[in-house]
Image (cartoon, rainbow, N blue to C red):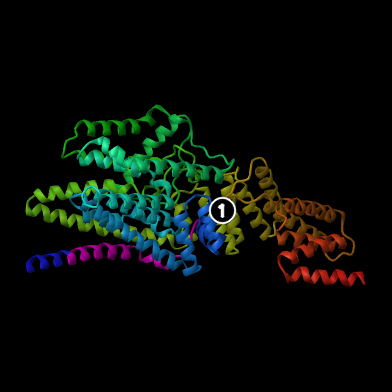
Amino acid sequence: MQADWKRDERSAWQLVAQAAVIVGAVLLVYLPAWRAGFVWDDEQLITANPLLRTFSGLIEIWSGGRTADYFPMTNTVFWIERHLFGENATGYHAINILLHGADAILVWLVLHRLQIPGAWFAGLIFGIHPVHVESVAWTSELKNVLAMFFTLLSIFSFVGSNEQRQSHAAYLASLFFFALALLSKTQTVFLPIALLLYGWWRDRGSFRREVIRTGPFFVMAAVFGLITIWFQNRGIGEEEIVIGSFPRRLVNAGMAIWWYAGKVFLPTRLMAIYPRWRFDSPEFWEWLPLVGLVLLLGLLWLCRNRRTRGAFLAVAYFIVALLPVIGFVRMAYLRSGTLVADHLQYFADVSLIAFVCSAVAMFANRARREIRTAIAAIAILLIAMMGAYAWQRTKVFQDEEVLWRDTLAKNPDAWQARARLGQYFFRQRKYSDAIEHLRRAVELKPELPENHNLLGLAYCRAERFEEGIAEYRKALELKESRASTAQSVSVATIRTNLANALTIIGNNLSGSATEIPSEATRRYEEAIAQYKKALELEPNQPAIHRNLGLLLARLGRLDEAEAHLRATLQIVPNEPAAEETLKEIEAQRR
């Protein structure tokens, strides 16, 4: 009995040591992320998200009132982080890194429970793989590492329900964790098919029993899948996002699957936004990747036996995990014009990594000592190379400028990168640099109102008001030609920006003259009209009331000015400009 106790103690310490190595490797690789800031849509989702500031916002997160996607579990964690860390990015990055480390450990434990050789090495590779950097170093991708955590727990529990005496408890735990995964990110809708594949691979009992056991998972996946499609369509609105005809979608899906597999085995030239894909009618040769994929699956199926059916499982799992994100349905990420992104393969990679690691482990177990030594040396070299590249890739997510300069160096025609870099320079008050990139963004994506509005702002800050006004007019023309989208700039904002520019031009034309020139009057009148139209859309915006009130006061229309300035103070008490101008109006009336 004492010998058994000592053996169990050694085994426990060995497990702890193995887990510590994985976590240590992850912490080392992602060391640059601890000093990184917020990038991309972190501002929209985290720092400037009003729902994360109040308890009523937390309720709205779960009711789905204003959210672009229904990921309430992820947004709840964001809500907690916002109250713990405020706008200090370090805490957010720490949570992402630790969750990714936990994911890597769970990959190892799930594969170990499945009795797959090389399980620990697969967990380590998953933890330091360069293609996963985007999911970890980008704060907004908490949804990936969190959903993966619950997905792996669901798989672990489901597998355990076939082995444990309390199988019902493990099965219910699996359902519970799957629900949490769906509430974190609905790309996990693939899991029921993966569990069905596992049941076939395990080859115990009847397949009919596995269908019944996975039935509730399929129901949950269908419900959350439909919810996600509804939220995505609401967020996209009438914005044109091209995904092509059904034949084109099939062709692109085949090419995307091979592309993602290539990034698993050769993760080079990683970037935030990849070059545009084709969405027109497919050429004959473009069907070849899909045909090759079907032939590969067919060959693996025909050659299946107890030893080789794992290969079919690995490839099928990889494909199934990618199905929600390879362009069959319209999703917001497709607005960039590309079909692929590093963070979209986070859930799928584990199958190919596990398959290769298990194949190498089985070969090494049968090989001579010299060959095993060579395999170990190659494995160490591979880990070092992957870790070094992942560390280097993590540094790219330091801030907006580094991220988008890296993207544009590899993909100069990425309009989103141009627009984001232009916004960054605008905030830094480097208006000439902002104009350069925003003009290019407009050239690449001329149909997007946001780009024209941003360029208009940059022109006006550079005191190139006529050019700015032209961009605002174009933004209005585009915006009013279709329904407003939840994620885009509002018509009221564009009208306000236009009115502000017209007012400044009017002021410049008037100068210190006692009588306002006719051209200035014309600009002022148009500005007033734009302010009023903006207020019809957003009547509770204090800045619009204030600016309109100040302009009316300048023109001597005191009664109208007073009404708008008092409206400003009702919304924002003690607003300095409104209070001062009201005092001046009262003085003029005496």
Left or right position of 422 against 93: right
Q: Is residue 511 above or below residue 132?
A: below
Q: Is residue 24 above or below residue 338?
A: below
The residue at 68%/58% (across/down) is 460
Q: Position of residue 440 (x, y in %)?
A: 57, 49
> Which image quadrant for residue 316?
top left
The residue at 39%/36% (across/down) is 253
> Which image quadrant for residue 191?
top left
Residue 405 visible? The answer is no
Report the front residue among 471 and 486.
486
Residue 19 colored magenta?
A: yes
Report the front residue among 478 and 111.
111
Per the picture, the main secondary structure of the magenta-coloured stretch is helix
Q: Is residue 147 above or below residue 285?
A: below
Q: Position of residue 181 (x, y in %)?
A: 39, 51
- Numbered range of the magenta stretch: 12-40
Which quadrant, please, contains the C terminus?
bottom right
Q: Where is mark 1, residue-wise?
A: 437
The amino acid sitting under disc 1 is His
The residue at 73%/69% (across/down) is 575
Which structural element holds mark 1? helix
**Residue at the limit of the structure toward the top, as seen here:** 284
Left or right position of 256 against 113: right
Q: Position of residue 489 (x, y in %)?
A: 62, 51
